[in-house]
Image (cartoon, helix red, strand yellow):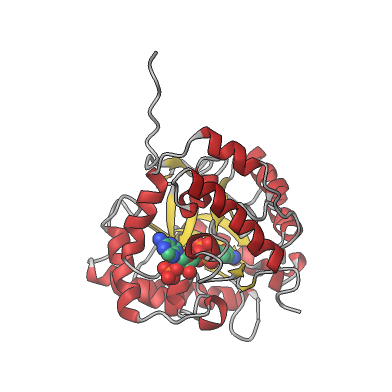
């Protein structure tokens, strides 16, 4: 009997746009050197080396944001792109625009930051730009004439932006934007992992519209790859003890099959046909090879069956983060 061999690195359609993208994007939040968010600093040299390694790999797909380190992540991505003489033809670049450091989320701010992104990245066009973290504004403000969405649409109409998306956390807020039908793509984060699946209704809604769907933070910001002893945090905050206990249960199953837990966490996302790409954050060049290895690790069906019997959360993992 013939068996279909699926190439885990095959590019996937970016929703209905016609663009094809690698199944993994390199998440550049850690490159913004955000000690408060991740709990550690990242040197510029490591950041640039990570981007160069990504550009030389089968996953030359860069996901950054104006907000990451208030331009620092984009500046460092820009250094790497300049070293390569610009964005290579096979690479995909995406960024996100939203509030500034004073939490101003007006149309003028989004315009100013979009212009800064182009400058820092050293490009005159960006493949995909997302409206970022709309929990920091209201739907009415974002959609108002001259507001953030209209500003980004204008850049798209001028050809400076290829496609528009929305990227953020809280599911009910994201749902409002998905339902407008104005966006090609959705990024959600920390809400579709082994530990938390609260994005399920949002994913269904976006899939029904044929949007590209990007699952960010498959390791829940790091614990599912670094382990709960080295990194007992989930979604940028201390993880509760019962969650850490569940990571140990997942770890025990993975160990029994001789599979790294990180491979299970990553493939939990990449094997889901609804996900266009999975965004993995990293700040060292050797992470690229690790990621490719985790992506290609064979995982038996019996392991997935055992994993399915371990409970997961469906609440908002960041509900108390900003209180
Ligand atoms: N609102 C939004 O749009 C939004 C929100 C969240 C995330 N995102 C995007 O999604 C990306 C992913 O999210 P995330 O970075 O928060 O979380 P993540 O991908 O779940 O985890 C990132 C962490 O995993 C670690 N890691 C990755 N590969 C590793 C390996 N092979 N070995 C050991 N450690 C490894 C990284 O450590 P090192 O730094 O030490 O490499 C980093 O601390 C972000 O970078 C960002 O681009 C977007």
Classify 263 as above or below 217: above
| The one of 83 and 126 positioned closer to us in this rendering | 83
Residue sitting at x 61%, y 51%: 194
Residue sitting at x 38%, y 28%: 5
* Residue 319 spot, x, y in % from top left: 75, 68
User: Which residue of the protein is positioned furthest toward the bottom in this rendering?
Assistant: 102
Judge whether residue 40 can be spotted in this image: yes
* Residue 259 spot, x, y in % from top left: 45, 47
User: Which residue of the protein is positioned furthest toward the top in this rendering?
Assistant: 1
Classify 65 as above or below 275: below
Classify 233 as above or below 129: below
* Residue 322 spot, x, y in % from top left: 72, 77
Residue sitting at x 34%, y 59%: 288
| The one of 188 and 312 positioned closer to us in this rendering | 312
**Quadrant in the picture for the N terminus:** top left
Judge whether residue 155 can be spotted in this image: no
């Amino acid at each position: 009997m013939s068996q279909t061999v699926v190439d885990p690195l095959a590019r996937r359609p970016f929703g209905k746009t016609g663009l094809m993208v690698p199944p993994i994007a390199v998440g550049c939040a850690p490159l913004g050197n955000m000690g408060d968010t991740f709990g550690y600093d990242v040197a510029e040299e490591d950041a640039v080396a990570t981007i160069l390694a990504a550009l030389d790999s089968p996953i030359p797909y860069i996901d950054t944001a104006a907000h990451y380190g208030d331009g620092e992540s984009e500046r460092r991505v820009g250094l790497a792109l300049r070293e390569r003489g610009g964005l290579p033809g096979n690479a995909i670049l995406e960024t996100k625009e939203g509030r500034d450091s004073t939490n101003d989320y007006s149309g003028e701010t989004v315009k100013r930051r979009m212009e800064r992104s182009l400058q820092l990245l050293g490009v005159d066009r960006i493949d995909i730009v997302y409206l970022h973290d709309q929990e920091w504004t209201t739907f009415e403000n974002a959609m108002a004439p001259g507001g953030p969405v209209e500003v980004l649409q204008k850049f798209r109409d001028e050809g400076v932006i290829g496609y528009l998306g929305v990227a953020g956390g809280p599911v009910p807020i994201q749902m409002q934007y998905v339902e407008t039908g104005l966006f090609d793509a959705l990024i959600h984060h920390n809400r579709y992992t082994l530990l938390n699946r609260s994005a399920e209704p949002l994913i269904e809604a976006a899939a029904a519209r044929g949007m590209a769907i990007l699952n960010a933070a498959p390791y829940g910001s790091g614990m599912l790859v670094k382990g709960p002893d080295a990194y007992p945090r989930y979604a940028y905050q201390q993880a509760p003890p019962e969650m850490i206990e569940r990571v140990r249960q997942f770890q025990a199953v993975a160990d029994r099959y001789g599979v790294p837990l990180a491979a299970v966490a990553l493939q939990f996302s990449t094997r889901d046909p609804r996900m266009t790409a999975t965004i993995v954050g990293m700040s060292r060049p050797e992470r690229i090879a690790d990621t490719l290895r985790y992506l290609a690790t064979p995982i038996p069906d019996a392991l997935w069956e055992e994993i399915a019997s371990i409970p997961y959360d469906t609440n908002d993992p960041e509900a108390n983060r900003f209180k």
